[in-house]
Image (tube, rainbow, N blue to C red):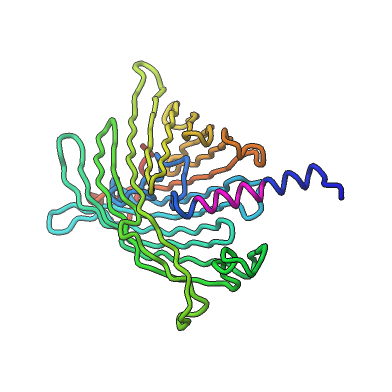
Amino acid sequence: MRIKLHDIRHLLAAAVLSTVVALGVHAQVDAAFSHFWTGQTYYNPAVAGELNAIRLNLGSRMQWVDFKRAPMTFYFTADMPYKLLEQKWGVGAKAEFERIGLYTNTRIGAQLAWKRKIGKGTFSVGIQPGIYSQTFRGKEAITVNESSESDKAIPKQDVSGTAFDANVGVYYTHPRYWAGFSVTHVTSPTIELKVTRESLDYYEFKVGRSYYLMGGGNIPINNTLFEIQPSGLFAYTQNFWTAQVAARVRYNRMLSIGAGYRWKDAVTAFIGVNLKDAYIGYAYDYPVSAISRATFGSHEVFVTYHVKLDPKEKNKNKQKSVRLM
């Protein structure tokens, strides 16, 4: 039987994706967004309420677009400052939907951050309680030999489950720089995947903790309209680590372009524009690992919208926009 080159490419893609998904169960659970420097609340709840504005973030990542059932992640966050009994707080919410292989993950959480002024900056401690819901589409699974032990461990029906989840973090922001440390899935929940809630038979999915260290800055170039905005992220999960760096150049607080690199994974190109109230950004990842033989890369779109909150306004319903940092 003749096998066409097109078929070989899809077989290779399926094999690589299966391997990556299998490793992903024991490695990083959260999506690796290239726009980590803009969507900080995705990783760290202490960032909530950072600005005197209602901040809305919408991000989407289409990973390895040539693969069937390749990872797709969409998330939304909203946060704002809040003052209670002379104490400054940050409140927010996060919702995420992800499909990777035969898995569908939904994560929802509420964010609360305590804040204290230190020097010219602000120190924050945050927590995000929520739920982690997962579904495995067992009806679509293809097994080699149903009599083998490995195939018996694969559900033949669609199963789902939900568990309590929580993230914590600390954060410091300054007019010229920012830095934060966070732990996601701090409770390390175990999700029991069942056909029905009443079912006695179930499969377990263990969610490991992930540790994130992030930082960045804003460096204006004297006597010009240009600024340099470097940033970096280090992540560690269950004996697996990764790191990425990014550097952008922004002109006239409006147009920005840049490049990034994720360790042994991909190089990234950025372009973004500030439109008074909003930031719209796009990132393209080109893989540098062996997976490049089966895909041409990943795409990411990110949108941020700010509505300024000014307590000095006489009309409490009147709102103005704030420019993006």
Residue 39 vs residue 198, the one in the foreground: 198
Magenta stretch, main secondary structure, is helix
Q: Is residue 187 left or right of residue 279?
A: left
Q: Position of residue 1 (x, y in %)?
A: 87, 50
Image vertical order of residue 194 relative to residue 231, above or below = below
Q: Farthest residue in the bottom direction? A: 198
- Quarter residue 317 falls in: bottom left
Image vertical order of residue 292 relative to residue 76, above or below = above
Q: Is residue 200 magenta?
A: no
Q: Farthest residue in the top direction? A: 223
Image quarter in which the C terminus is found: top left
Q: Is residue 2 left or right of residue 11?
A: right
**In the image, what residue occupies the spot 58% across and 42% down?**
298
Q: Position of residue 268 (x, y in %)?
A: 53, 33
Q: Position of residue 302 (x, y in %)?
A: 49, 45
Q: Position of residue 55 (x, y in %)?
A: 37, 50
Q: Is residue 221 left or right of residue 199?
A: left
Q: Which residues are magenta?
A: 13-23
